[in-house]
Amino acid sequence: MKLSQTPVTQHRFEGHSFFLKRDDQLHPHFSGNKARKLMALLELEDKGVTHLIGYGSPQANSLLSLAALAKMKDWQLEFYVDRIPGWLKENPIGNYRIALELGAEVIAVSELTDEPIHPHDYIHANRLGEGCLYVPEGGRSPIAERGVVTLAKEILEWVQSNHMENVCVALPSGTGTTALFLHKHLKAHGIEVLTCPCVGGKDYLVEQFKELGETSFPAVLETPSKHHFGKLYRQDYQTWKALLEQTGVEFDLLYDPLMWRCLSDWLLENKNKTLLYVHQGGIIGNESMLPRYQRKYGE
């Protein structure tokens, strides 16, 4: 089973021209960087697998991607979380809502034991038996490289067929897995990869890179002030709205605005470069994020 190649479109933002790799169009529910990292599992032919096991937040993009993958492969997804808020159970929204519709089991470990235990530890103690395929949080695993190699090949084909020069590929990072493997497979072709840390700072992101066994890393951009993952920032919201207004494309509210804020200074200093931005998918997550921003900052 394979997904079709995503297109590249041209846009302008804040007076700068850039190209956009539309990875949000891979699949309605299986898209963006999570789909790329899980592509090897989509292509896996193993009749012994019956259950897909993962963990994270009940609104994680990875939850939706794993649910879609399990649906396509006729597997049962068990996705472990610390807890599920009562309001979310009563009024499912966003990634959580659609994952349930796709047949996922979202399991709160706080309801399984009286002792406090992290979902990762609970899984390793109880759910790694026969028929179970485990995926680390956010897809940070060597299995992600295969799907990212496909993305790198698509980018290289676009660069060569359109005779592009001085190309830089940009995308935000959670675990940094996609950016790291893109860098690994594009650097020999003179294509630079830029990223920014959305979870923790630069030091944390570099440690994530090292855990995957690589020694050469993409360029890491940062904003002057510290950015806390999941916190609402007026500047992120304004950037997201400006992107939508100026490009006509909806971006993810959690990761993309921070990357574009980091790119604002970079674009001023690198006018000779050709920017190719990789869309992160994650649009369904906006179903829960956007009302939070609207409540705090208004329309």
Image: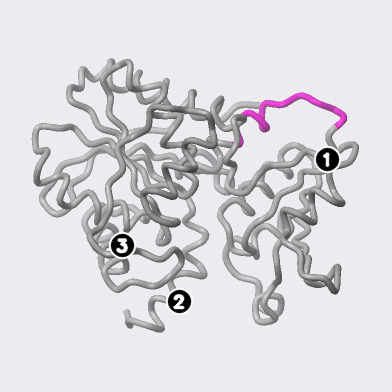
The amino acid on which the numbered mark 2 sits, given as a three-letter code, is Pro
Seen from this angle, which residue lies furthest right? 130
The amino acid on which the numbered mark 1 sits, given as a three-letter code, is Cys
Q: Does the magenta run of residues contain 66?
A: no
Nearest to N terminus: mark 3 or mark 2: 3
Element type where label 2 sits in the image: helix
Magenta residues span 38-48
Residue 90, can we see it? yes
Residue bearing mark 2: 291
Q: Identify the image quadrant of the N terminus.
A: top right
Q: Is residue 297 left or right of residue 56?
A: left
Image mark for residue 181? none
Q: Position of residue 82 (x, y in %)?
A: 70, 67
- Which one is nearer the viewer's eye here, 75 or 213? 213
Is residue 98 positioned above or below 33 on the image?
A: below
Q: Residues within 10 Å of mark 2 (few under 14, many from 20)?
A: few
Q: Is residue 114 left or right of residue 168?
A: right
Nearest to N terminus: mark 3 or mark 1: 1
Element type where label 1 sits in the image: strand
Residue 103, can we see it? no
Element type where label 3 sits in the image: helix
Residue plotted at (84% across, 43% down):
128
Q: CA gap, disc 2 to disc 1? A: 36 Å
Residue bearing mark 3: 240
- Which one is nearer the viewer's eye here, 104 or 207? 207
Residue plotted at (60% across, 50% down):
62
Q: Identify the image quadrant of the C terminus.
A: bottom left
- Please report contact status of discs 3 and 2: CB closer than 8 Å, yes or no: no
Is residue 280 positioned above or below 225 on the image?
A: above
Residue bearing mark 1: 132
Nearest to N terminus: mark 2 or mark 1: 1
Q: Residues within 10 Å of mark 1 (few under 14, many from 20)?
A: some
